Image (cartoon, helix red, strand yellow):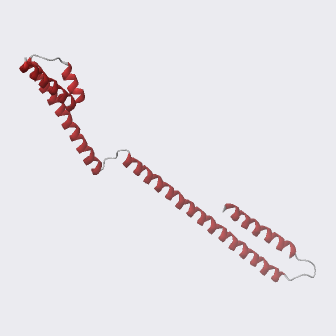
Amino acid sequence: MKNIMWVLMLAGVLSTGIVLAQDHPQPGGAPPSAMREQFQQLELQNRVLDTQAHEEKLRFEREMNNLQITQRRMAIERENQSGAKQGAPTMERWHRHGCFGFLLLLCGIVHILMTVWVYQDIKRRNTGSGIWIVVTLITGLCGVAVYALVRLGEIQNAKAA
């Protein structure tokens, strides 16, 4: 756009200079009033070209501003979208994480209660080892099930003997 503007301005200046050089008064040439009219027409054409160049420049600047605004909007939207994906606190996320957190807390409490039950049973029966407490903490329900099977086996062996 800038190149077009410069070309138009240069064409206006050159055309004015060429026309003036061609219409230079010569002895026995055109009367001064005709030259004045031609000069005024050339000035008018020059002003029209300047006005068109200025309008093109303004249109170009307006389009550039619109483009920059659009780019900024897109960048902000990308930031908002990436922020929401990376953990922005929305109600849905809070609800989903809240339920998951509650479930995790409940599992932790059940693990601890099962471990306490195994510990109390080992202490009450005065048999077994502390390894069952660690197994229960690590494996949870599976460890308690294995402990219960071993305990039932010990009880059955004790009754049989």
Q: Check the image and report above or below for 62 versus 20.
A: above
Can residue 124 be seen? no
Give the image quarter of residue 144: top left
Could you tell whether 73 is left or right of 99 in the image?
right
In x, y percent, where is residue 52?
A: 66, 71
Q: What is the number of callouts on the image?
A: 0
Can residue 82 be seen? yes
Give the image quarter of residue 109: top left
The residue located at (35%, 44%) in the rendering is 87
Q: Quadrant of the N terminus?
A: bottom right
In x, y percent, where is residue 49?
A: 70, 71
The residue located at (20%, 26%) in the rendering is 136
Q: Quadrant of the C terminus?
A: top left
Q: Check the image and report above or below for 16 versus 155.
A: below
Residue that lies at the very extreme toward the front in this rendered image: 160
Q: Nearer the viewer, residue 105 or 46?
A: 105
Give the image quarter of residue 7: bottom right
Q: Check the image and report above or below for 149 versus 4.
A: above
Could you tell whether 24 is left or right of 155 in the image?
right
In x, y percent, where is residue 77?
A: 43, 54
Q: Nearer the viewer, residue 76 or 40?
A: 76
Q: Check the image and report above or below for 39 versus 76.
A: below
The residue located at (16%, 24%) in the rendering is 150
In x, y percent, where is residue 138?
A: 24, 27
